[in-house]
């Protein structure tokens, strides 16, 4: 009887779980599908509120309009460069820091961890950070975006926990064979850490790709903005009744130009994510579960 009850309870759990997850998927996917439908719909259908999940008055005119704006492609290129450079630097710094903290025999290890955790809850504030970036001469440069966000403490702690779970015997054997600390890290530890590395690359890349406030704050030239600031300016222009970018006063595209820009902005992440997703759960869980 106990086995039957457990089986029934498990079945109920699976049904309830499926219903809840299906609802989460619908709530998550619906806004994006609506944005895609609006980007492909006629302006008059959007104004009339006829567009839901299927495009009405199918047209690519707005895509052509946005693609003809050189500012959009300049900002798009900036986003790609900022994301690639920032992610590479962040991965190098986070990996090195996490590997050091994973060594329990390290002197001052508790202090170094405390410094990292402290920054999760306390910061200097917006104005001091702005003064610091300005005094270092980093304004209107990629380093104003890259350096202040080079280490995420959350990512650091996940990688630290992952490295701590690796067999120490492998590193000891490599050390006996004469391999240096950097050799052990590059040739032993990192090849065994593909899951967590891929997960951290995804975390950092998405964070830098979606970031706009740092560029908006520290950059004053339009040709240095990322595409997220371009999108922000479009939305702000629509809110205030002004236009930004190319001749956005053309009312045949003014209604859905924001939707088109959103779609074009999110496409690279959607393309990359499936290739990294298989490492995602494994990388996070192996860094969090201790035996």
Image (cartoon, rainbow, N blue to C red):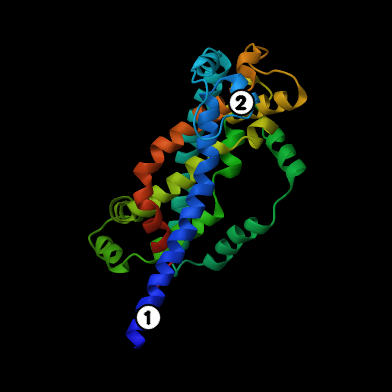
In this rendering, the answer to whether 20 lies above or below 187 is below
Residue carrying label 2:
46
Residue 223 lies left or right of residue 125; in this view the side is left
Question: Of 79 and 56, which appears nearest the observer?
Answer: 56
Q: Are marks 1 and 2 in contact (CB under 8 Å)?
A: no
User: In the rendered structure, which disc, 1 or 2, sits on the residue that comes first in sequence?
Assistant: 1
How many discs appear?
2
Determine the secondary structure under disc 1.
helix
Q: Nearer the viewer, residue 70 or 90?
A: 70
Q: Nearer the viewer, residue 84 or 27?
A: 27
Figure check: 134 above or below 254: below
- x, y percent for residue 267: 46, 32
**Residue 247's quadrant in the figure?**
top right
Check residue 78 in the rendering and tell me which mark sits there, or answer none: none
* Residue appearing at x 42%, y 71% in the figure: 12
Task: Find the residue positioned furthest to the bottom.
Answer: 1
- Spot the residue most to the left: 177
| Residue 130, x across and y down, in percent | 72, 38
SS class, disc 2? helix
Q: What residue would you read off at disc 1? A: 6
Identified at 38% across, 82% down, the residue is 5
Can residue 100 be seen in the rendering of this structure? no
Give the CA separation, mark 1 to mark 2. 51 Å
- Mark 2 is surrounded, within 10 Å at the Cα level, by few (under 14), some (14 to 19) or many (20 or more) other residues, namely some
- Residue name at image x 61 percent, y 42 percent: 148
Q: Position of residue 1 (x, y in %)?
A: 34, 88
Image quadrant occupied by the C terminus: bottom left
Can residue 42 be seen?
A: yes
- Left or right: where 63 falls relative to 230: left
């Amino acid at each position: 009887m106990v086995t039957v009850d457990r089986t029934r309870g498990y079945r109920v759990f699976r049904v309830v779980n499926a219903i809840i997850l299906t609802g989460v998927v619908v709530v998550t996917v619906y806004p994006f599908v609506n944005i895609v439908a609006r980007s492909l719909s006629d302006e008059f259908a959007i104004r009339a509120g006829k567009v839901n999940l299927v495009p009405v008055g199918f047209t690519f005119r707005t895509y052509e309009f946005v693609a003809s704006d050189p500012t959009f492609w300049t900002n798009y290129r900036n986003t790609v460069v900022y994301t690639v450079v920032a992610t590479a630097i962040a991965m190098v710094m986070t990996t090195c820091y996490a590997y050091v903290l994973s060594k329990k025999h390290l002197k001052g290890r508790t202090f170094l961890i405390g410094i990292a955790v402290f920054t999760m809850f306390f910061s200097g504030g917006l104005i001091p950070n702005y003064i610091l970036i300005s005094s270092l001469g980093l304004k209107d440069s990629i380093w104003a975006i890259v350096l202040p966000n080079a280490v995420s403490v959350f990512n650091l702690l996940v990688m630290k926990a992952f490295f701590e779970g690796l067999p120490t015997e492998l590193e000891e054997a490599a050390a006996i064979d004469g391999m240096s600390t950097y050799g052990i890290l590059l040739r032993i530890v990192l090849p065994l850490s593909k899951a967590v590395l891929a997960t951290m690359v995804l975390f950092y890349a998405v964070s830098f790709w979606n970031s706009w406030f740092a560029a908006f704050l520290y950059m004053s030239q339009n040709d240095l903005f990322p595409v997220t600031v371009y999108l922000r300016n479009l939305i702000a222009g629509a809110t205030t009744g002004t236009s930004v970018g190319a001749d956005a006063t053309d009312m045949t595209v003014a209604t859905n130009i924001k939707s088109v820009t959103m779609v074009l902005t999110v496409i690279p992440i959607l393309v990359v994510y499936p290739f990294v997703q298989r490492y995602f759960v494994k990388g996070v869980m192996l860094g969090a579960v201790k035996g």
